[in-house]
Image: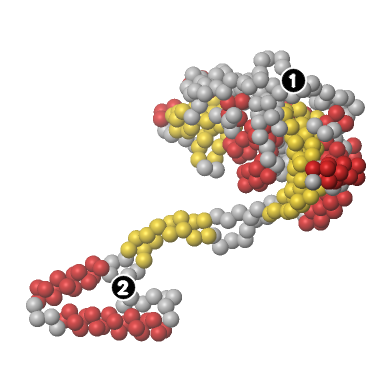
Amino acid sequence: TRIGHLLHRVPPGASNPIPEDDAKPLDATEGELAPSTPSNGAGRCIGIGDLVVVYEGFNRQKAVTVAEKGCYQNRYGTFPHKEWVGKPFGSKVYGKGEAGFVWILAPTPELWTKVLPHRTQILYLPDISLVCHALELKPGSVVLESGTGSGSLTHSLIRAVAPKGHVYTFEFNRVRAEAASEEIVSHGLTEHCTVTHRDVEALGFPDELEDRCDAAFLDLPGPHKCIPSVAKCLRPDGVVCSFSPCIEQVQRCCQALEAEGFGDVHTVELLGREYDVESRELQRDLGVEQPRLTSRWKREARDKAKRKRKHVDTDANGDEGRGAVAADLESLEPMGVVAAHPRQEAQHHTGYLTFARLVPYASKEAIAAAREAGKTRS
């Protein structure tokens, strides 16, 4: 269920209105919560109105909507959109005059994270992958998200729960909520995602979602304020994740989680580290003075080189001596190797990910009944 196959155009006139706080946008039936699987679009060709990702290099991509009279320009040349129509996704296209080329790719959550318009700070792939894994998402899961922002995580959540799951995402800023809703509509994901304008910190999640969700993700200034509402919406054994940039937010969130009966509370911080891979030459002639060698090693290297030269000079056969010298010189030529080493720079901090699991609550009556049942079996 690659999201590149799900990002298809919806029919003209389709809309995804933003529900108000006092409305009930989440009263869908169980049948509506399990939409049918859309066509996977394998081998689909590009058409007018499709969203494509123009790939120029590893850190140079751009999202483009194909238009009939559109034209994409960059340092590699001019690329009329009409020449893209009919080509399969992943094609290599050349500009006018074949001065250069680009790749036109189908949008995926990973590519969309790189090219989306930034309305807020976003989560990047390392954090997103850990969140989707730790929340134990699978096709058919129902997920809560508070803090839609730019929709970076939202698209990955949709792919994880498609084709029968659903993502309910909430944003307190109306402008950002409307922009995110328009993106979901244009990407053809309305069956898998509902965007709602609502202040979850103040109002909590809607009552319609009580005891219906499998996981929840919080990206809020005060996540501890809505933990009681999360506990009501999650099913037993559900998982919640809170993303916070400050450790003070983590402390208050952990206190609220323990107060609401969550267990297995733990916090993770991902620190990125980049490596440089390059070709180097290793010096094999110990007679060559090396700057990093100690004085003792230098002295021993010189003595060893002198003994080798004396042995060659006293060789009785001149030709053999010259051959030995040539062989020694060849063996002492620098050797090329490929080396990888970490960059000497400070590791960057994005935020803390706090995970917790809603422990199934056992009432006193249930505990007593279980004990009686155990005594009867014994």
From where the camera sits, is residue 102 visible?
yes
> In the figure, residue 166 lies in which quadrant?
top right
Q: Which residue is mark 1?
A: 31
Q: What's the residue type where badge 1 is placed?
A: Gly
Q: Is residue 242 visible?
A: no
Residue 180: x and y in percent read: 73, 31
The residue located at (79%, 21%) in the rendering is: 29
- Disc 2 residue type (three-letter): Asp
Looking at the picture, how far across and down is residue 361, in whole percent?
84, 43
Disc number at residue 74? none
Local crowd at mark 2 within 10 Å, few (<14), some, or many (≥20)?
some
**Viewer-closest of 220 and 263:** 263
Comparing 314 with 73, the one in front is 314
| Quadrant in which residue 25 is drawn | top right
Rendered image: mark on residue 285: 2
Could you tell me how far apart the alpha carbons at marks 2 and 1 are, in whole angstroms? Answer: 76 Å
- Image quarter of the N terminus: top right
- How dense is the environment of label 1, judged by Cα within 10 Å: few (below 14), some, or many (20 and up)? few
Question: Element type at marker 2?
Answer: loop
Nearest to viewer (mark 2 / mark 1): 1
- Which circle's residue, 2 or 1, is located before the other in the chain? 1
In the rendered structure, the answer to whether residue 55 lies left or right of residue 346 reads left
Q: Position of residue 199 (x, y in %)?
A: 86, 37
